[in-house]
Amino acid sequence: MSRVSNILPDEAVFDDFKKQCLATDNWQNKYDNHGMQVWIEVRAVNKGNHVPKVHKMKCKMIVKDVSAATMFDVLHDSRYRKKWDVTMQESFDIARLSANADVGYYSWRCPIPLKNRDVVTLRSWQITDDEYIMVNFSVKHPKFPPRSNLVRAVSIQTGYYIKATGPNSCIFTYLSQADPKGSLPKWVVNKASQVLAPKVMKSVHKAGQEYSNWKSQNSPDLKPWLHPEQNTLPMMDPAELSIQRADSLENVDESSKLDANEGEDSS
């Protein structure tokens, strides 16, 4: 992906993301319980090969009672997200970039003493007969710069791969490499991601179980992520966006400590 006209993910990006979700080589299992698995990528350290301090993590969940299509709808439906995402502070779509890509804003609450975080991401998706893929990464938007009261986090690559295994069952995989920025030591970030991922996945699963009933009472035919003609967001030229780099992945103070008495999480 180039930084300007070709910022939109192409077929190769979706293919590579799917391969990462299915891969087992160079992935170390950290959690395996009740149909849920958490893995972190293990990268060899060779001379001249710098390994990022924030792990690439994936979590796979076997869903036996919700269809792949419904789980995909849950991820897209911003109105419904307000019902189940308890950490969300603010979320909205900004603009359309294509029939299967948009740019949006999301902020979430962090436990004291940390500052709350936000992110601006380019999201794109692809649907085949029995597979659903969604990928996002952080971008710079000219009208949504970082806010002084929030720490701007960076998604290097985050997304979902959903594979149908039956009419009402699927394998749901979440993969992410994201830097929350601020003064959090990277070992805390990595450990937290492994512990929190199963909890988040369980919340998404529960949301999937309850979505059909909720949607039947809330604009049941409105799904602009499936029907682009329903999308009322303004169009935006992708060339106005640029990829948000995560310099903190390469410049980390390994000796930094998380001070529970620190009243402010630096940006």
Image (cartoon, grey):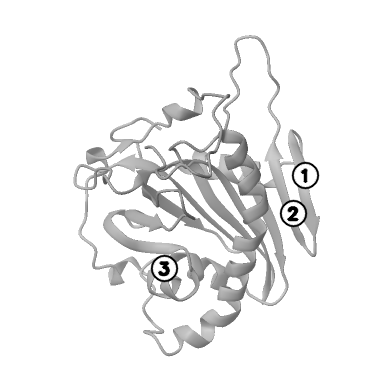
User: Which residue: 41% across, 72% down?
Assistant: 82
Q: Which residue is mark 1?
A: 29
- Rendered-image quadrant of the N terminus: top left
How far is disc 1 from disc 3 in space, using C-alphas? 34 Å
| Among the 4 quarters of the image, the one containing residue 43 | top right
Q: In what element is the residue under mark 3?
A: loop
Camera-side residue of 115 and 85: 115
Mark toward the viewer: 1 or 3: 1
- Which residue is at a point 69% across and 40% down the rendered structure image? 40
Q: Is residue 37 above or below residue 69?
A: above
Residue type at mark 1: give it.
Answer: Asn
Could you say which disc has been placed on residue 226 in the image? 3
Q: Circle 2 sits in a helix, a strand or a loop, which is it?
A: strand
Mark 1, other Cα within 10 Å: few <14 / some 14–19 / many ≥20: some
Q: Position of residue 64 (x, y in %)?
A: 73, 73
Residue 37's label in the rendered image is: 2
In-image side of 227 versus 51 (left or right): left
Crowding at mark 2 (Cα within 10 Å: few <14, some 14-19, many 20+):
some
For the image, the number of numbered tags is 3
Q: Amino acid at mark 2?
A: Gln
Q: Is residue 164 left or right of residue 233?
A: right
Which residue is drawn at the image coordinates 38% and 56% (left, top)?
Answer: 107
Q: Name the spot of residue 152 as percent of width and height, x first.
A: 36, 43
Is 9 on the left-hand or right-hand side of 257? left
| Discs 2, 1 touching: Cβ within 8 Å | yes
Of the numbered discs 2 and 1, the one sitting upstream in the chain is 1
